[in-house]
Amino acid sequence: MELLDLQGSAVPEQSRTHIRIPFELQANVDRLQIRLEYAPKILEDREAALNLLQESYELYILPEQREQAIARADRHLPLKNLITLSLDDPNGYRGACHRHDPVQELFLSRESASPGLMSGELEAGAWIATLSLHCIVTPTCDYRLRIQAAEKEGSA
Amino acid sequence: MTWIACELHTHTLHSDGRQTLRELAEGAVKLGFGAIALTDHNTMSGLDGKEEIEREFGLTIIPGMEWTTFYGHMVTIGMSEFADWRQAGRSDIDRGIAEVHRLGGIAGLAHPFRIGSPACTGCFWEYEVGDWNAVDYIEVWSGTFPSIQTDNRRAFKLWTAKLNEGYRIAAVSGRDWHAQEDTDEPISVTYLEIEDRSGEAEEEAGASGDQEAGTEAEASLREARLIRALGQGRACVTIGPLLTMTLEAGGKTWPVGSAVPAALPGTGGTVPETNEAVRVKLSLDFTVRSGLWSLPGQMFRLKLCSNLGEEVNLDLPFAGNRPVEHEHEHEHEEDASSLWFEREAELPGSDTAAPRIWLRAELWGTVRGAYTRIAFTNAVYFDSEKEGGGSR
């Protein structure tokens, strides 16, 4: 049963924000299947990327070392979008998947879960999926989050 | 007391690491570590099954989590449960730290000067800390061969600046270890000092005669002791020999992390002469993690540094992974398997107008062609008279 299919488009101004997506879980769910995908992953425009880096060097690198940093900027390329997912059940945190893969197929059940998520009872009630937009470097970044529930066999 | 070799910043497949906890544990034991903290990004799910791995490898695995936020990365260890990293705004990290403390954990700044977004999202520390007293530690050395890197030098300077302002903050290294990849770069180790096994755990479990319960109680005691040691700054950091320091004052010994009261015990509670000299005992143990590190022969330099600057400089000839005999050195044993020595130094008493408030030792030398810090201790602190003799 599909619980959620949400698509959106993020822009650089949304960097450093969370998108909280509540969904309702019915009783007798055996397994949650979650798919997060976003694209593009990489900022291909080299000039734009170097401009972004140069701006960040103003903030993070000492003035006397900036010139050298700009000359070595390639070590920080390519720049990437990063969106991560974390999950809360009605009682609290159920983990996060902080990794760079732009397509993540995740699952959660009583006995086991994808790395980063915590297995355990799938309690009915108000759950929240949080998308953390750590950094959006491309002009737009399309994301899609799908959550499906499989019911326990033999349950009414 | 025993010094335990620790790696305090690690990741697994549960975040963006490329290793399982078992692979990490195996790699840590091979490198001579006695304890690691698992600090996956924003999750503690990787700790599942840790007791079995601890037993299998004889390694202590301290629970932790790296808050991987938009304005900084914060390593947290020892929490009983999850503290929410998502609520922290740029100016209210103090609330986050308080929550970590409430859950029994301690918190440190991770690689505070690593370049931030977009190259490394949230990696640069941009939080405005309201109360630096709440910060337990700073990861002043991040990565392998950390001491030569500019961002780590900035972190070390931040630590020194905070000590000068009177804060008592520990300093550690963390490899930020993501994968089992060989490196020929020097690896830094944070040594934490804990009490020796005292049989408390056996006593606890003794009533039931349950040996397994005893082993588990022992493991959790050791974990608690390591966390406490870090919180108190009983820590020394090195890419080679273990450098430790104790102070002798008022007939007592003061280890790193402790505070020497202004009114010393044994002096009847009276304020000692301000010009009373402080005796410092420095130890270098070259036998630690034997065979797992090497340094070329050279003249090392030992420094005693405080808020008053570099107070003492001592030269120390070193023949390449073993100390050279020297007339002022006091070699305890001739046995080559026990290469360590001690040295004592006297510091002048400090002026009441400009009192000494902290002191640490540093070992400097040339590594891979760069003259750099090889090891440093955490600080011993000095209470001021105004504080009324401070922490006894």
Image: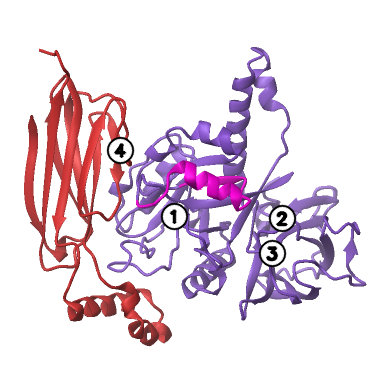
Q: Which residues are magenta?
A: B16-38
Colour chosen for chain A? red
Q: Secondary structure under badge 3? A: strand
Please state the chain letter of the residue tagged with numbered disc 4 in the rendered image: A
The N terminus of chain A: image quadrant: top left
Task: Tell me the residue that label 3 is attached to.
Answer: B359
**Dot placed on the residue nearer the N-terminal end, 1 or 3:** 1
Report which quarter residue A3 is drawn in.
top left
Q: Going 16% across and 17% down the picture, which residue do you hit?
A: A153
Q: Amino acid at mark 1?
A: Ala
x and y, in percent, of residue B319 in the image: 79, 73
Lateral position of residue B187 relative to residue A136, left or right: right
Chain coloured purple: B
Task: Tell me the residue that label 4 is attached to.
Answer: A117
Q: Amino acid at mark 4?
A: Leu
Total numbered labels placed on residues in the image: 4
Q: Nearer the viewer, residue B99 or B115?
A: B115
